[in-house]
Amino acid sequence: MKYYLVALLDKESGKVIESSTRNLIKKIKPKKKTSFYGVVLETIEDPDLTKLEDIITDISRPIRYFKIDVQGNLSFDESTRTIGLDVSNFGYVKSLSRNFNTMLGLHGFKVREEEEIESKDSVQLVLFNGGITKDLASFQNVLRKNAGSKFRVDRFQLWKNFNFRKDSVVATIPLKDPNVISK
C-alpha cells in the first residue's frame, strides 16, 4: 500500500484557499473535495509505520513553519490523480522532498526515484481528488482576490491514501513555530 507524506497548510491559509475556490466545485465537478490543502512531498510503499513515523519526526525536528507561493492556475497531476493549484518558487519544497527521499531511501524504505523528483517542473497544492472532468486551462487565475498572498505550512501528515477522510491520516508531525522561543 502507498503512503503519502504531505505538507499541510494552516487553518487561516486553508480558509483563504477554500473561499477562493468555492465556486469551482460547480464548474469542474470533481469526484471529491479535500478538507486538507497540502503539497505531496514523498510517496512511500509498504513501510513499517512505527519506524517510518520515528524517522520522519527526527528529520522534521529542525524544520520551522514555511510559506509557499501559490499561483491561480489549475493543474492535474497524473501520478496522484488530483486537481490542484500550481506552486511557484517551489525550491524549498523540492529540497524538502529531496531530503525526505534520500533519508528514507537510506533507511531502507521504497520511495520514488531521485530522478523523478529532480525532473518535476512544478509542484501542486492539492484541491480535489479524481480525474479531469472539464478543461482546466479555461479557468484562469482562480486566486484573483488573494493574488500575491503566501500560504503557511504548519505540519506534515502521513496519509495512507488519497480519499481525504480523517481516518486516512496515520500520523501528524507539527513543525516548529518560529515565534516561540524554546530551550
Image (spheres, rainbow, N blue to C red):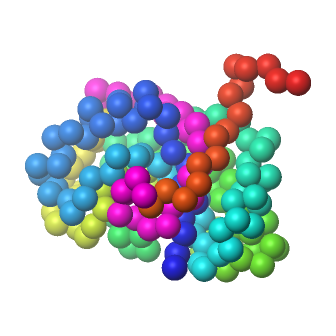
Tell me where residue 179 appears, x and y as whole percent.
70, 19
Q: Is residue 72 above or below residue 114?
A: above
The residue shown at (21%, 39%) is: 22
Q: Is residue 4 above or below residue 92?
A: below
Pick whichever, 70 or 30, lies toward us: 30
Pick whichever, 15 or 113, lies toward us: 15
Q: Is residue 104 above or below residue 1?
A: above
Tell me where residue 14 appears, x and y as whole percent.
40, 35
131 vs 82, left or right, is: left
The residue shown at (40%, 46%) is: 36
28 vs 168, left or right, is: left
Q: Residue 130 magenta-drawn?
A: no
The number of discs equals 0
Tell me where residue 45 appears, x and y as whole percent.
59, 78
Q: Residue 156 magenta-drawn?
A: yes
Tell me where residue 131 appears, x and y as whole percent.
25, 70
96 vs 10, left or right, is: right
Q: Quadrant of the C terminus?
A: top right
The answer to whether residue 83 is visible is no
- When asked about the image quadrant of residue 41, the answer is bottom right
Q: Which residues are magenta?
A: 144-167
The answer to whether residue 103 is visible is yes
Q: Residue furthest left?
A: 26
The residue shown at (35%, 63%) is: 163
Q: Residue furthest right?
A: 183
